[in-house]
Image: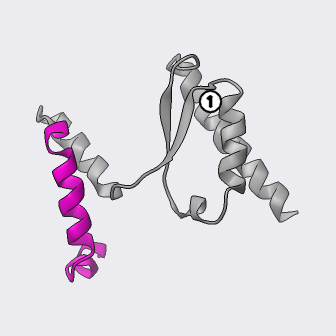
Amino acid sequence: MVRRVIEWAGRELGSLATGVICQLDLESLDFDVVLVGSLYDCGTLLADAMQQTVHAIAPGARFVRLTAPLVVGGVLLGMEQVSLNGRAFRERLIETTKVLLNSSAAPLLAG
């Protein structure tokens, strides 16, 4: 029963992704689908069901795990909004954010 629920959830996530893929007309392209969150740390059942659903309409989709801290995306979007080239700072931002999150300041950042 639990296995079926997890597979259903994966198919539903895949359906959400395919909706975006179709709206952006990406079906025939190669692109990354970035998996974020601890749900994907508990085995492959969820991700496998999601991948099967997405690959049915977008065989070029590659599934990758996010390796950068989540906050980096928000900072890069903010930089883009004020016309700064975030790509030039991306790697350094990822590196320094990981160091900061692993430091003694991490409890302060967590709230």
Residue 33 percent location from the top left of the image:
51, 38
Q: How many labels sit on residues?
A: 1
Q: How far from the left and from the top, in percent, is residue 34? A: 48, 44
Residue in the picture at 50% in, 59% down: 37
Count residues near mark 1 (Cα–Cα under 10 Å), then give few for <14, some for 14-19, many for 20+: many
Please state the horizontal and vertical placement of residue 12, each as a whole percent of the image: 70, 43
Determine the residue located farthest toward the right in the rendered image.
Answer: 1
Give the quarter of the figure containing the N terminus: bottom right
- At 11% from the left edge and 35% from the top edge, which residue is drawn? 84
The residue type indicated by label 1 comes to: Thr
The percent position of residue 81, horizontal first and vertical second, equals 18, 35
User: Which residue does the image show at 58% across and 19% down from the upper left?
Assistant: 27
Q: Which residue is mark 1?
A: 18
Left or right, 90 with respect to 15, comes to left
Judging from the image, what secondary structure is the residue with disc 1 in? helix
Q: Which residues are magenta?
A: 86-111
